[in-house]
Image (cartoon, rainbow, N blue to C red):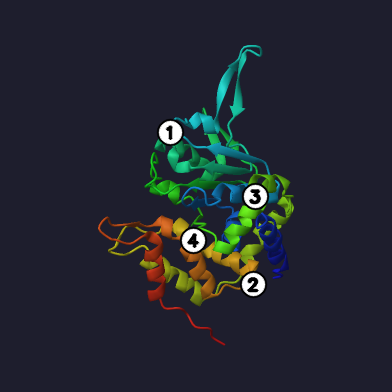
């Protein structure tokens, strides 16, 4: 398997997005993994760290149709999916598509909407289709929901249910820039201007080719067993209320294959699995209330306890 197309794809997207978001190449690479896997990404961080700008830059770099939805407590499901309205001139009902009918969806501050409105995303994120009044509409590929979420301690937010969190391929955090990086951002042009000037650097045909190719990345029996050891410990544990689902184990497998290809290898190594586990698994587990530990720390501790397979000749 030739992985040069994966490496070049990552380089072009990363270089383009880095013109807007400085020092976050690792997060950009993880979003590329989600894109190739056909998954969705949840960016969770405090306001003002560049979540929205990153996702805008990513959508511009891909060149697909893009819609931004600002989630608010008064948002209704029909505001997202669309409605059938009566056209008096034509004398019939006509479907008016909502903003979910695009290739790239930016769901900004998703957890500010009520659970009823959040649920409007469940079908389209899993099935890539939207059903309105008994009629289903297929979404065009690539289709990706990129959501931002403020921490739950922020005023006026609603926790995302486990069923919806499980539909996100990854949950990522941007964090703050270094001192030097932030000074360089302060001196440059406005990020909104930079985003508007970004060119498209990859095509839908290239993406489709990579999606067909990545399953060829080899996963040895030892590495596959290592993945299942991690998933089992994140599933059957006294510290957990809910463990990792089968959707989570499949996501870990695919993410490990893709990140290996993006780094120029046609085989997965344990380091790929460990890295992707920290992005793919934490949001899929629920800790018991009296455990003073966050999900990321729980998965990190778990990874330290799972025996890593050694290379054999």
Q: Residue furthest bottom?
A: 313
Q: Which residue sits at x=53%, y=83%? A: 311
From the viewer's perspective, is the residue at label 2 or at label 4 nearer?
4
Which quarter of the figure has residue 301? bottom left
Which quarter of the figure has residue 69? top right
From the viewer's perspective, is the residue at label 1 or at label 4 nearer?
1
Mark 1 / mark 2, whichever is N-terminal: 1
Pointers 2 and 4 in contact (C-beta within 8 Å): no
Classify 213 as above or below 117.
below
Please tell me whether mark 2 sits on a helix, a strand or a loop: loop
Please tell me whether mark 4 sits on a helix, a strand or a loop: helix
Q: From mark 2 to mark 4, how far is it between C-alphas?
A: 21 Å
Mark 2 / mark 4, whichever is N-terminal: 2
From the viewer's perspective, is the residue at label 1 or at label 2 nearer?
1
Pointers 2 and 3 in contact (C-beta within 8 Å): no
Mark 3 / mark 4, whichever is N-terminal: 3
Q: Which residue sits at x=39%, y=45%? A: 154
Classify 215 as above or below 70.
below
Q: From mark 1 to mark 2, how far is it between C-alphas?
A: 46 Å
In the image shown, does 101 or 137 lie closer to the viewer?
Answer: 101
Q: From mark 1 to mark 4, how far is it between C-alphas?
A: 28 Å
In the image shown, does 176 or 65 lie closer to the viewer?
Answer: 176
Binning the other alpha carbons within 10 Å of mark 1 as few (below 14), some (14 to 19) or many (20 upward) gives some
Pointers 1 and 2 in contact (C-beta within 8 Å): no
Q: From mark 2 to mark 3, how far is it between C-alphas?
A: 29 Å
Q: Which residue is mark 2?
A: 266
Pointers 3 and 4 in contact (C-beta within 8 Å): no
Pointers 3 and 1 in contact (C-beta within 8 Å): no
In the image, which disc is placed on residue 57? 3
Q: Position of residue 305 (x, y in %)?
A: 37, 75
Q: Position of residue 254 (x, y in %)?
A: 55, 62
């Amino acid at each position: 398997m030739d992985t040069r197309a994966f490496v070049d794809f990552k380089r072009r997207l990363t270089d383009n997005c880095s013109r807007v978001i400085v020092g976050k190449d690792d997060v950009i690479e993880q979003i590329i993994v989600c894109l190739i896997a056909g998954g969705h990404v949840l960016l969770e961080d405090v306001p003002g760290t560049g979540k929205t700008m990153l996702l805008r830059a990513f959508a511009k770099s891909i060149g697909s149709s893009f819609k931004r939805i600002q989630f608010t407590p008064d948002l209704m499901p029909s505001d997202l999916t669309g409605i059938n309205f009566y056209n008096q001139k034509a004398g019939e009902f006509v479907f008016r598509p909502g903003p979910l009918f695009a290739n790239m969806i930016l769901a900004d501050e998703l957890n500010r909407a009520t659970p009823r409105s959040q649920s409007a995303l469940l079908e389209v994120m899993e099935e890539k289709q939207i059903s309105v009044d008994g009629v289903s509409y297929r979404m065009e590929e690539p289709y990706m929901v990129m959501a931002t979420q403020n921490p739950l301690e922020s005023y006026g937010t609603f926790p995302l249910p486990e069923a919806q969190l499980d539909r996100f391929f990854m949950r990522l955090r941007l964090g703050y820039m270094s001192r030097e990086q932030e000074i360089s951002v302060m001196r440059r042009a406005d990020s909104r201007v930079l985003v508007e000037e970004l060119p498209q650097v990859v095509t839908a045909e290239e993406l489709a080719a990579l999606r067909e190719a990545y399953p060829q990345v080899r996963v040895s029996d030892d590495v596959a067993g290592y993945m299942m050891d991690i998933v089992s410990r994140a599933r059957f544990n006294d510290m957990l209320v809910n463990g990792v689902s089968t959707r989570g184990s499949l996501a870990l497998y695919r993410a490990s294959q893709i990140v290996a290809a993006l780094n120029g290898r046609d085989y997965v190594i344990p380091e790929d699995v460990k890295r992707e586990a920290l992005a793919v698994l934490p949001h899929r587990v629920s800790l018991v209330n009296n455990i003073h530990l966050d999900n990321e720390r729980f998965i990190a501790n778990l990874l330290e306890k799972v025996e890593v397979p050694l290379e054999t000749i």
